[in-house]
Amino acid sequence: MKLRKLASADNERGFTLVEILVSLLILLLIITACVPLFTLAIQTTHSNKAKTIAAELAKQELEKTLAQVTPNNYNNEDPAAAGGAPLQVGITGPYYKTLSDGVTVDPQYASYQIRKIVLWIDDPADGLHPDDTLPFDYKELTVEVSSPSAFTGRVARQADFKSFLAREGAPSAVAGLIVNVVRGWRDDDGNAIPVEGAFVTITSGLDTDSTLTNEFGQAMFPVSFLNEAVNSRTYTVKAEDSGLMMHPNPSHHNTVNVTRFSTNSIDIEMEEPGSITVQVSPQHKGAVVSLANTDLLVDHGGSLSADLSAGDTSVTFSDLWPVGVSGAGGSGGYPGDYKLSVSDVVAAEFDGSAYDEADWECWKPDSEENGVAMKNLWLYKSDLGLWEANPDNYTDVDYHAGDHEHRLACKSIDLSAFAPGPNMDCQVKLIPDPSQLALETASESFSDFEVLFKSQDGAALDSSSGSWSSLLTVQGFRDLKNAGSSSIDLEAADLTDSFRLRFDSDPDIERMTFGSFDIQCIYTNNNVKFSAPGQNMTVKVNGN
């Protein structure tokens, strides 16, 4: 008898721990790759379900409205009129489907919002107004249903049912207002581009109506004259559309009259607003930026302005009407260009109370002549925060007596950071503190005297007069008393070439002082013109 040999347990082989871990990793990768597919499938299923429900709901609302329309109530705009106003022009909603009581929201459709839109249509087959003298041809009924996404919460339109309804023997609307909404910018052929879907509101006293523009950019409003003593009504018009602005000048669209037994119209221009960012050198000590256009900034008195504090580098003017290039802007072309000016730009600021005497140079300095100590008249008065040339300061010593020997010049002034940008004109002015620039003498027969000079960088104090140009000449006693009362013009070249300032005194001037002063730039005559709708322009006023 043969005995079968039993297999040893040592010969049986299973999975090792490493093999199990690798298998789990592969399985995890497969599941991870499939998760987006599962998510997409769920989203698609939910979206399809929402669209199916919305389509059925829109169909029900459309059929419900159509069932209420009769030849007698087709033109009704007052819900209280006989037969109601199932085709009242404008937007109804959003609202929810209700139960049979007409009040309780149907829980089955609690997340679905309904919006009904009714528009008059001017059939292009018989011409558009004004060629068509009876433009109210038929009505367009649209039912929209929207619901929030279960994943993002964002409300999306799920269904859009549309129907055109002829009058079927109903009396024609013989009085009305047509608002034509077009883009301010024209196409390449100069034709107006209609704005479809703009929300238009007309107001006359307490009477307000709203509707949307159709594909031709028309918002059509029937107007009833219930009071037979009234033959016309005046309406103000407002149009709104996402991302667009109305022409900012009310004179272009403010009011329109609607007369009995006629159809009147008004054109409204809308366009995507632009912006202008003005950049200035960060080295300035203060500035005022202004943007002007009397036609387009009516609500702001014709101009906008902004103050820049020291170190501010830019300011942006937004919501600007951009139309204005050749071929755009409607009949005649509305101006879309703005005049930019930047004033009170403090390019250099000299504070008399913080002068460093090392930054100033005297000629002839303190010296000794023939054994006598000689002084320059200029002396810095730290307690007053100004320079003073006064012979009374030198009771124990003498001072140079020659004409124009008492000169005092500051260090080099570099204003290259304020050189004007393209198309910018710039005026440069030195503005002294009038309370500190003063000249005094007892003689009213005081002769002319040049007290302020300018020179290109590097000019020495003992240079001939040709190296220094005179900026301020005191002519007679009256000018002497008003020496510091006005600004002093510099040159545009001073913004590119560094220069020095020199103050001259004389013993015949019994006392001369100067302290704080600024050098200011005024940038003008820069017309900024938009070249496209919604353009965000940047204008560099100065600097590199």
Image (cartoon, rainbow, N blue to C red):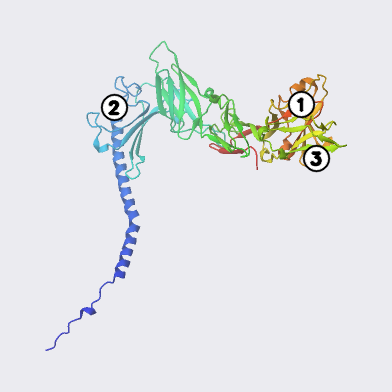
Residue at the disc numbered 2: 68
C-alpha gap between disc 2 and disc 3 = 99 Å
C-alpha gap between disc 1 and disc 3 = 25 Å
- Looking at the rendering, which quadrant does residue 64 occupy? top left
Binning the other alpha carbons within 10 Å of mark 2 as few (below 14), some (14 to 19) or many (20 upward) gives: some
Q: Amino acid at mark 2?
A: Gln
Q: Nearer the viewer, residue 538 or 261?
A: 538
Q: Amino acid at mark 3?
A: Ala
Residue at the disc numbered 3: 460
Q: Nearer the viewer, residue 161 or 511?
A: 511
Q: Residue at x 74, y 25 (%)?
A: 483
Q: Is 88 located above or below residue 232 in the figure? A: below
Eye-nearest disc, 2 or 3: 3
Question: Which badge, 2 or 3, is on the more N-terminal residue?
Answer: 2
Eye-nearest disc, 1 or 3: 1
If the image is split into quadrants, where does the C terminus sit? top right
Residue at the disc numbered 1: 511
Count of numbered badges drawn on the protein: 3
Residue farthest along the top direction in this orientation: 229
Q: Is 357 located above or below residue 25 in the figure? A: above
Residue 318 position in % (x across, y down): 53, 34
Image side of residue 273 versus residue 287, left or right: left
Question: Which badge, 1 or 2, is on the more N-terminal residue?
Answer: 2
Q: Is 535 located above or below residue 4 in the figure? A: above
